[in-house]
Image (spheres, grey):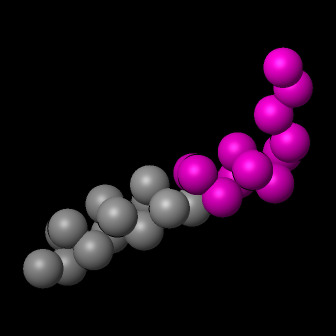
Amino acid sequence: MHIHLDERNCLLVTALRGEDNSKSS
């Protein structure tokens, strides 16, 4: 199965956002 770049980017962005939120809190 081939994952679209956008899909992977979305997951990465979500992960980064989650970390950023955790650090901000």
In this rendering, the answer to whether 23 lies above or below 24 is above
Is 3 one of the magenta-colored residues?
A: yes
- Residue positioned 19% across, 69% down in the render: 23
Q: Position of residue 19 (x, y in %)?
A: 31, 60
Q: Position of residue 9 (x, y in %)?
A: 70, 53
Which residue ends up furthest to the bottom in the rendered image?
Answer: 25
Q: Is residue 21 left or right of residue 13?
A: left
In this rendering, the answer to whether 24 lies above or below 2 is below
Q: In the rendered picture of this protein, how many numbered marks are placed on residues?
A: 0
Is 15 one of the magenta-colored residues?
A: no
- Residue positioned 58% across, 51% down in the render: 11
Question: Hey, which quadrant is residue 17 in on the image?
Answer: bottom left
Q: Quadrant of the C terminus?
A: bottom left
Which residue ends up furthest to the front in the rendered image?
Answer: 1
Secondary structure mostly seen in magenta is helix
Towards the viewer: 17 or 4? 4
Question: Hey, which quadrant is residue 18 in on the image?
Answer: bottom left
- Residue positioned 81% across, 54% down in the render: 6
Q: Is residue 8 left or right of residue 19?
A: right
- Residue positioned 20% across, 79% down in the render: 24
Q: Position of residue 1 (x, y in %)?
A: 84, 20
In this rendering, the answer to whether 8 lies above or below 16 is above
Q: Is residue 12 left or right of residue 22?
A: right
User: What range is drawn magenta here?
Assistant: 1-12
Which residue ends up furthest to the left in the rendered image?
Answer: 25
Q: Position of residue 12 (x, y in %)?
A: 57, 51
Q: Is residue 6 left or right of residue 25?
A: right
